[in-house]
Image (tube, grey):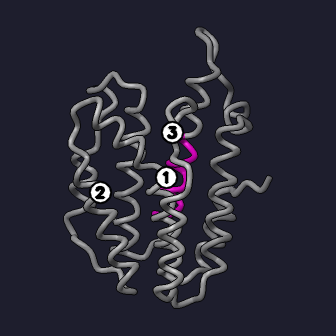
Amino acid sequence: MVALDEFMLEQRLRRLPRQGRLAFALLLNERMIPALYKFANEADFDSSIYRRCLNGAWSCLDRGRASFDDDCVKECLEHAPETEDYNHLLTSAALNSALSIAAMMEYMADDDVSHVVESAGLARDTAASYAQEMEAVAPRSLSFDEVMMHTLVLRELQQQADDLEFVEALPVDIPQAAIALVKERAVTMPALLPPGLA
């Protein structure tokens, strides 16, 4: 199993064309957003801004350029669910999804690869929080090393590595046929949800 550390991920992302980085970020965010949707449905939270931003990012990928609604980043951050305000199993996952979408939108604004790396880290952190919830029995919690070696975290890191390999294999200019493959992959990938909810 190949796990990506942040340095390796950043180096490989830097070698991708701009649209390839966006495709990778979209794959991450499409896997994360089902947790936000489930949270929103059960906690009476309006998640529509996040879908609007994702749809805008897909449109940018389709058009081959990364123009977008400048207010998306601000709205994503201001509207993100606060963990202190909700007592729901998926609050942290919903927050991570919201922050990840905001990071992707920041990438689209400034082309800074660190935003895509941030999104990947938020996906990993979501899997880590599921592992901690699943395995920790009060008063004991898992150590950092135990969490990072947990099946859920390793599975997420492997998914990221697979997604990166998939995007690296796309043609540099990402023609419409390849964009269709990215969209198909986004729809068929398993959602990043805790076991039992996936």
**Which element is circle 1 on?**
helix
**Which element is circle 3 on?**
loop
Residue at 62% in and 18% down: 136
* 23 or 78, nearer to the observer: 23
Neighbor class of circle 3 (other Cα within 10 Å; few <14, some 14-19, many 20+) is: many
**Between disc 2 and disc 1, whose residue precedes?**
1
The residue that disc 1 covers is 31
**Between disc 2 and disc 3, whose residue precedes?**
2
Rendered position, 88 above or below 98: above
**Between disc 1 and disc 3, whose residue precedes?**
1
Asked whether residue 124 is drawn in magenta, I would say: yes
* 24 or 176, nearer to the observer: 176
Residue at 44% in and 56% down: 30
Asked where in the image residue 10 lies, by quadrant, the reply is bottom right
Percent x, y for residue 186?
Answer: 50, 62
User: How much space separates mark 2 and mark 1, taking CA atoms?
Assistant: 13 Å
Circle 3: residue type = Leu
Q: Label 1 near label 2: C-beta < 8 Å?
A: no
Circle 2: residue type = Arg
The magenta region covers 114-126
The residue that disc 2 covers is 51
Neighbor class of circle 1 (other Cα within 10 Å; few <14, some 14-19, many 20+) is: some
Percent x, y for residue 118?
Answer: 49, 56
Is 58 positioned to the left or the right of 124 in the image? left
Asked where in the image residue 62 lies, by quadrant, the reply is bottom left
Residue at 51% in and 86% down: 174
Identify the disc placed on residue 193: 3
Circle 1: residue type = Arg
